[in-house]
Structures are given as structure tokens and as C-alpha cells.
Image: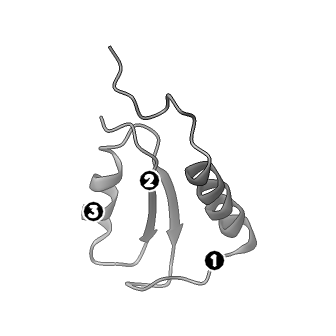
Amino acid sequence: MIDFPTLHIVSKSDFTIRASSNAAVRYLNPTILFHGEGHKVPRLSNEDFLVFMKFIKAAMNPSPMQHLPQL
């Protein structure tokens, strides 16, 4: 498992949904946003925008010990 913050934006109607979903499970705590707009960058709902901003803020202020390998 990779312990690094990631954001996965996946379309429920995209032909790459299986590959996109499989990529996300390789990370310890992935943030995943599902949308229904096909293979493109979606217009985010208010709820999804809040998830997106929470991810960005956390990525900008990571804990100093967050990305060190576990011993």
C-alpha cells in the first residue's frame, strides 16, 4: 500500500472506470470522487467541491511524519 495523498476523479459512465478504480486501491487512504459526466473533467457538485478542497488543503499542509515509511 502506498501512503501518499491521492485524489481520484472517476466517471461512473467512463470506459476506464475499472482501471481507475483499481488504481485507487493501491493507496492507503485515497480520496475518490465519482461523477456521471463521462471521460472528462466534471463540473463538481457543492458536496464534491468540499471534498476536493479538503483534499487540497490537507495536501498543502501535510504532517511532517505523514510520508515516512512505517518501521
Residue 50 horizontal side relative to residue 67, left or right: right
The residue beneath circle 1 is: 44
45 over 20 or under it: above or below: below
The quarter in which the C terminus is drawn is top left
Residue 55 horizontal side relative to residue 69, left or right: right
User: Which residue type carries mark 1?
Assistant: Leu
- Please give the name of the residue rendered at 47% of the width and 83% of the height, measured from the top-left corner: 41
Looking at marks 1 and 2 on the same chain, the residue that comes earlier in the sequence is marked by 2
- Please give the name of the residue rendered at 35% of the width and 52% of the height, measured from the top-left corner: 24
- Please give the name of the residue rendered at 55% of the width and 52% of the height, measured from the top-left corner: 59
| x and y percentages locating residue 9 in the rendered image | 46, 68
User: Which residue type carries mark 3?
Assistant: Arg
Q: CA distance from mark 1 to mark 2?
A: 17 Å
The answer to whether marks 2 and 3 mark residues whose Cβ atoms lie closer than 8 Å is no
Q: Give the quarter of the image for residue 67.
A: top left
Looking at marks 2 and 3 on the same chain, the residue that comes earlier in the sequence is marked by 2
55 over 36 or under it: above or below: above
Task: Describe the element under mark 1 as helix, strand or loop.
Answer: loop
The crowding category of the residue bearing disc 2, from other C-alpha atoms within 10 Å (few below 14, some 14 to 19, many at least 20), is some
63 over 18 or under it: above or below: above
Q: Residue furthest front?
A: 64
Q: Give the quarter of the image for residue 20.
A: bottom left
Q: Which mark is residue 18?
A: 3
The residue beneath circle 2 is: 6
The answer to whether marks 1 and 3 mark residues whose Cβ atoms lie closer than 8 Å is no
Q: CA distance from mark 2 to mark 3?
A: 17 Å
Q: Which mark is residue 65?
A: none
